[in-house]
């Protein structure tokens, strides 16, 4: 990986965008399910009866009202997940040693990521460009707020993978500091861990 790409991956806005967008595939999945109108069936006719059957019918796919938009959501979801995986894999290079002095879990604050999911249960038509544009603007504003403010968007994908958010007090080189930590393991007092600073208020613990 080039030095320029490593630097780009470490920029706060890049991580924030990947962290936010990586939590959207479940929302898109709900929207895709709502767009399904039925199943596509295939019938195979046997030349001769097999086990008393002359034909067999089985589903081969779904019928969608807006298949092009659905495929777009699938592609965006895959790209978002790949970006999140790539950033998480590389963001913790050259970590710093710290000692946790206090840790309080914030992972129970599920309201922070249920708000975006509420829009999938209101009247939303994927065939209308106005609705799609409104969705893009809404998610864009939400992403910007999560990057620019200290309002952490709790990523349900990372939560499912075992990551949690913690309000931490810690010592680094003998200096007392505080930070919100994204960690793949439970944090307790006196834990010796390696971490990488992401911005002025958030860090990530190396697995």
Image (cartoon, helix red, strand yellow):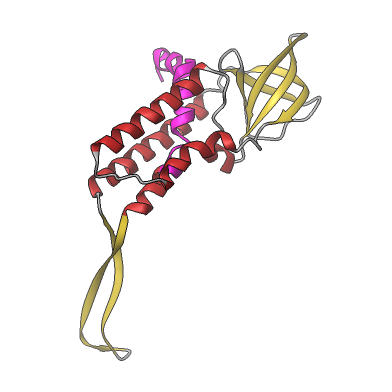
Q: Is residue 48 left or right of residue 168?
A: left
Q: Quadrant of the N terminus?
A: top left
Q: 152 or 42, which lies in front?
A: 152
Judging depth in this view, the residue of 97 and 187 nearest the camera is 187
Q: Residue at x 43, y 32 (%)?
A: 21
Which one is nearer the viewer's eye here, 197 or 41? 41
User: Residue at the location (30% across, 91% down)?
Assistant: 52
Relative image position of residue 182 (x, y in whole percent): 62, 28
Q: Is residue 108 left or right of residue 198?
A: right
Quadrant of the rendered image containing residue 167: top right
- Name which residue lies at 67% across and 18% down: 179
Report the quarter where the C terminus lies: top right
Q: Residue 205 location, x and y as percent? A: 64, 26
Q: Residue 186 versus residue 65: which sits nearer the camera?
A: 65
Kindly give the residue lying farthest to the front in the view shown: 123
Q: Is residue 4 magenta?
A: yes
Q: Residue furthest bottom?
A: 52
Residue 146, position as x, y percentages in the image: 50, 23
- Please tell me whether residue 142 is drawn above or below residue 70 in the rendered image: above
Residue 58 in the magenta stretch? The answer is no
Which residue does the image show at 45% across and 25% down from the upper left? 143
Highlighted magenta segment, given as a residue range: 1-27
| Prevailing secondary structure class for the magenta stretch in the rendered image | helix
């Amino acid at each position: 990986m080039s030095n320029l790409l490593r630097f780009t991956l470490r920029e706060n806005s890049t991580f924030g965008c990947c962290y936010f967008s990586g939590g959207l595939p479940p929302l898109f999945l709900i929207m895709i399910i709502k767009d399904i109108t039925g199943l596509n069936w295939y019938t195979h006719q046997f030349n001769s009866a097999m086990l008393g059957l002359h034909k067999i019918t089985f589903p081969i796919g779904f019928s969608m009202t807006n298949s092009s938009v659905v495929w777009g959501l699938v592609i965006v979801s895959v790209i978002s997940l790949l970006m999140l995986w790539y950033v998480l894999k590389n963001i913790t290079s050259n970590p710093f040693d710290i000692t946790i002095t206090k840790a309080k879990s914030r992972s129970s604050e599920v309201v922070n990521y249920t708000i975006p999911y509420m829009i999938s249960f209101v009247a939303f038509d994927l065939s209308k460009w106005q609705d799609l544009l409104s969705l893009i603007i809404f998610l864009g504003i939400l992403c910007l707020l999560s990057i620019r403010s200290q309002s952490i968007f709790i990523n349900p994908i990372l939560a499912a993978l075992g990551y949690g958010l913690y309000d931490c007090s810690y010592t680094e080189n003998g200096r007392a500091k505080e930070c919100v930590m994204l960690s793949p393991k439970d944090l307790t007092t006196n834990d010796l861990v390696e971490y990488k600073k992401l911005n002025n208020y958030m860090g990530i613990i190396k697995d």
